[in-house]
């Protein structure tokens, strides 16, 4: 599918939520707050802050209420929180959340394994969340997990993603985000999926959430740009990962690497790479392990040194 490559993209920084949620080390609340504040200063217009899930399900997000209330909220920045169900929504709205994220899987097996709900039950939950969100004046960003491949069922066809996306738009989602949850997509997969989905809604109603588990994330970003998509999730330092990949495997596409790519192909993003690197340098001590971003590992943009004499 040929399309004009967008001149500007929107990046949703997901490091504070998707990046930190599976970290083994308990991250102090004040560190999470500072991390979000540093990212706010980097120029993001969208930041996914936390998740209002049950603390037993995701202990790292047990302080969601405190974190969301404590962050410095800059005018014009949309601070997003994940909610899994109406109970989580009640907590999020009480904390002042105005932008809600919810998830529905494209695979029945993944949905049951991940949340013990069928896809249809998950869509019923989404209906309740979107209805209550609209009544409260909150906006909804809906994710489709395992939109390209499932660890239990294998490749996921576009024909299975389409009806889930249709339902989410019908329920009132402002945007539907396609998640390569286990990092199996290739550029051809992106093109094939969007051939099916773009007739349903224009390019600015879709977001892409790539994992770099198999080193394809930036190639998939390029394929997305080539079909006209302009909304991308990324995580500072490459924080986060797929629980179905081995230890040390790359997770979310790294924000630094995404920014470097976009700069290289002349696509505007309005995010300060140096500030993102500062945020990554701050959080690395808290997580206690190296970050996977190649640009972070290289120290940022190319700098020169004196030539040997």
Image (tube, rainbow, N blue to C red):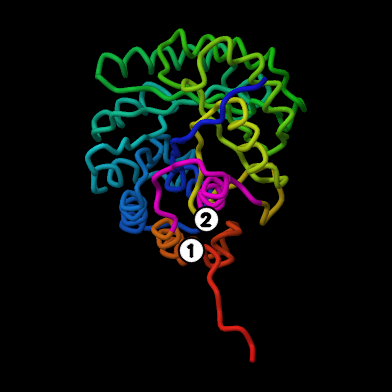
Whether pointer 2 and pointer 1 mark residues with C-beta atoms closer than 8 Å, the reply is: yes
Q: Quadrant of residue 4?
A: top right
* Residue lying furthest right: 154
Judge from the rendering whether residue 303 lies leftward or rightward of residue 278; answer left or right. right
Residue at position x 34%, y 26% in the image: 89
Residue at position x 31%, y 31% in the image: 92
Q: Which mark is residue 284?
A: 1
Q: Which mark is residue 197?
A: none
Q: Is residue 255 magenta?
A: yes
* Secondary structure at numbered mark 2: helix
Q: Which residues are magenta?
A: 250-273
Using the image, determine if residue 268 lies above or below residue 110.
below
Judge from the rendering whether residue 8 lies leftward or rightward of residue 28; answer left or right. right
N-terminal-most mark, 2 or 1: 2
Q: Quadrant of residue 294?
A: bottom right
Judge from the rendering whether residue 214 lies leftward or rightward of residue 209; answer left or right. right
Residue holding disc 2: 237
Observer-nearest of 136 and 22: 136
The nearer-to-camera label among 2 and 1 is: 2
**Residue 99, x across and y down, in percent:** 33, 29
* Residue lying furthest front: 309
Q: Is residue 39 magenta?
A: no
- Crowd band around label 2 with a 10 angstrom C-alpha radius: few (<14), some (14–19), many (20+): many
Using the image, determine if residue 226 lies above or below residue 119.
below
* Secondary structure at numbered mark 1: helix
**Residue 302, x across and y down, in percent:** 55, 66
CA distance for labels 2 and 1? 8 Å
**Residue 53, x across and y down, in percent:** 42, 34
The C terminus: image quadrant: bottom right
């Amino acid at each position: 599918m040929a399309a004009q490559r967008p001149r500007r993209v929107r990046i949703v920084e997901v490091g504070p939520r998707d990046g930190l949620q599976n970290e083994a080390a308990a991250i102090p609340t004040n560190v999470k707050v500072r991390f979000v504040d540093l990212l706010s200063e980097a120029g993001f217009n969208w930041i996914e802050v936390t998740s209002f899930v049950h603390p037993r399900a995701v202990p790292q997000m047990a302080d969601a209420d405190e974190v969301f209330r404590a962050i410095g909220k800059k005018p014009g920045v949309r601070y997003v929180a994940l909610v899994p169900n109406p109970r989580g929504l009640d907590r999020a709205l009480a904390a002042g959340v105005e932008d809600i994220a919810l998830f529905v899987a494209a695979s029945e097996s993944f949905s049951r394994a991940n949340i013990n709900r069928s896809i249809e039950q998950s869509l019923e939950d989404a209906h309740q969340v979107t209805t209550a969100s609209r009544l409260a004046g909150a906006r909804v960003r809906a994710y489709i997990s395992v939109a390209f491949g499932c660890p239990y069922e294998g490749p996921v066809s576009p024909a299975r993603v389409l009806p889930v996306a249709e339902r989410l738009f019908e329920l009132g989602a402002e945007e539907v985000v396609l998640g390569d949850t286990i990092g199996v997509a290739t550029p051809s997969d992106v093109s094939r999926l969007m051939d099916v989905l773009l007739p349903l809604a224009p390019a600015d109603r879709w977001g892409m959430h790539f994992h770099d588990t198999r080193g394809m994330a930036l190639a998939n970003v390029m394929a997305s740009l080539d079909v006209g998509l302009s909304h991308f999730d990324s995580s500072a330092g490459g924080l986060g990962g797929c629980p179905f990949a081995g230890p040390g495997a790359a997770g979310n596409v790294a924000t630094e690497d995404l920014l470097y790519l976009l700069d290289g192909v002349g696509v505007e993003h309005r995010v300060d790479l140096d500030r993102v690197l500062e945020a990554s340098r701050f959080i690395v001590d808290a997580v206690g392990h190296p970050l996977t971003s190649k640009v972070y590992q290289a120290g940022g943009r190319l700098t020169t040194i004196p030539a040997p004499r």
